[in-house]
Image: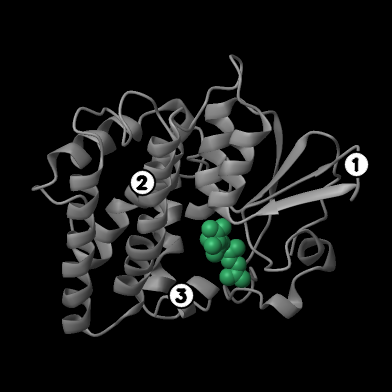
Amino acid sequence: MASAPKLGKELTFLCSWFCPFAQRTWIALLEKKTPFTYHEVSLRNPKTGLWYPLTEKPKWFTDLNPLGKVPTLAYVSECEPEVQTVYESLICNEFLEDLATSEEHPALLPPHPAVRARARIIMDHFNTHFVPLFYRILVRQDKQQQQEVAKELLAQCRWLEDNIDSNGPFLMGEQFSLVDCAVLPWFVRSYIMEHFRQLPLPPSDCPKLTRWVEAATKRPSVTGTYKAPEEGESYRDKLLEHYIRYADGTANSTSAAAFK
Ligand SMILES: N[C@@H](CCC(=O)N[C@@H](CS)C(=O)NCC(=O)O)C(=O)O
């Protein structure tokens, strides 16, 4: 599957190049300028293309994250337990914010407690409502069901449009934040939705969201995560290829099963 990383005091970031959840944390690491070592974990069997079940994942990986998922952050600490691990993308990102916020490591949450709470409400809402629909419209093969899910996805875009900052350029206003990190990976993948389901995201009646996607997807912390598995390959093409198994209903990942 993958070799065990050699952990040290610096953060090791366990990632899979295609994973939008891991991309959330990757963007946050780059935004915060947190030193880290990237460790690619291959979650799919290269011979069959199928995802390894939890029982076939190496012990070193499930010891670090019992769910056997990326993103996972791990490091050797000076206190007990010696190896500290953090997983679940939104928790990883809050951890990075708690770990270091200073002149050198920019804050990714607004200072006021009520505005921070608002940021968390948007992240939680997006995670609970938008993310499952993104997978559901791909894995469902029935056209009518796809159309119903498309309506729900568009309604979720409108929810975002109504709940993000009016002036932008970022979701919480002038400063790029954890909310941008949490939402962006699914809009980086909007061309995939257009390709397989002919659904433009964001829709044309969401001008704030459209402007945000334009600006935010060009940010170095975001383009810095556009890495195809092999040197010289196109990230966009490889990502599209990765989603074929979702779109033809053959993906056996936990997300495909959970969001069916
Ligand atoms: N709720 C998790 C989801 C992470 C997740 O599902 N990651 C996928 C890759 S995109 C994974 O590791 N899947 C392993 C599997 O399905 O066995 C998070 O936010 O971090």
Disc 2 and disc 3: Cα gap in Å? 19 Å
Quadrant where ligand 1 appears:
bottom right
Nearer to us of marks 1 and 3 is 1
| Residue holding disc 1 | 79
Apparent side of residue 59 relative to residue 66 in the rendered image (left or right)? right
Visible residue check, residue 141: yes
Q: Secondary structure at mark 2?
A: helix
In x, y percent, where is residue 76?
86, 42
Along the line of sight, the residue nearer the viewer: 211 or 244: 211
Q: Secondary structure at mark 1?
A: loop
Query: Which residue is label 2 attached to?
Result: 188
Residue at coordinates 58% horizontally, 14% vertically from top-left? Answer: 103
Q: Quadrant of the N terminus?
A: bottom right
Viewer-proximal residue among 176 and 13 = 176
Q: Is residue 254 shown above or below 243?
A: below
Determine which residue is flagged by label 3: 256
Q: CA distance from mark 1 to mark 2?
A: 39 Å
Q: Is mark 2 within 8 Å of ligand 1?
A: no
- How many badges with numbers are in the image? 3
Q: Is residue 53 toward the left or the right of residue 217 in the image?
A: right
Q: Quadrant of residue 62?
A: bottom right
Q: Is mark 1 within 8 Å of ligand 1?
A: no
Mark 1 / mark 3, whichever is N-terminal: 1
Which three-letter amino acid code belongs to the residue tagged 3?
Ala
